[in-house]
Amino acid sequence: MIFADKIGFSYESVLHYYLGNEATFTPAKTYTGLLKIILPHIFAFGLFVMVVLHFVIFTKKRNTKEITFIILLTFLSAFLELFSPFLILMGFSFFVYMKIISFFLFQVTLLYILFILFKSIIYDK
């Protein structure tokens, strides 16, 4: 909800959030400002993902290719979600789409992992 309210999900809203917009008097983000935002998120994302994915070891799906793929996808989407704003500031506007896609992909992969965990708690006794 914070992402939707603060940044938005359209190409223009993400671009204006990071590069600024004179019409709405929105200043452009700086590299220092991005670091202040991203640094705590690196630790929070990493810790949350590590703990949630650690619990997958206790499920029946722990040694499957599906889980390996989901784990890699989760870490890749978290990495892209955190570091794509730097590339947007460098002028690579393509990474606006990467920011939006990686945000949704990160949320979906975490929800899927949580679904697997809750399903294993309820049905795999």
Image: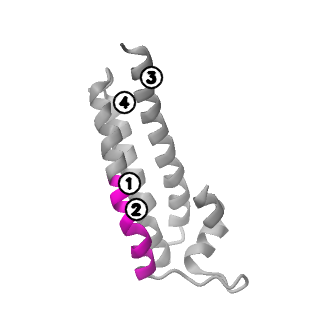
* Tag 2 residue: 41
In the rendered image, residue 52, in percent from the top left (x then y), is placed at 35, 40
CB contact under 8 Å: marks 1 and 4? no
Dot 3: element: helix
Q: Give the mark count.
A: 4
From the image, state whether disc 4 or disc 3 is nearer to you: 3
The 10 Å Cα crowd at callout 4, few under 14, some 14 to 19, many 20 or more, is few
Question: Label 4 sits on what residue type?
Answer: Glu
Q: Is residue 34 magenta?
A: yes
Q: Is residue 79 magenta?
A: no
Q: Which mark is residue 66?
A: 4
In the rendered image, residue 81, in percent from the top left (x then y), is placed at 45, 59
* Tag 3 residue: 119
Bounds of the magenta span? 32-46
Q: Which mark is residue 45?
A: 1
Dot 2: element: helix
Question: Label 2 sits on what residue type?
Answer: His
The structure residue drawn at horizontal position 42% and vertical position 35%, both measured from the top left corner, is 113
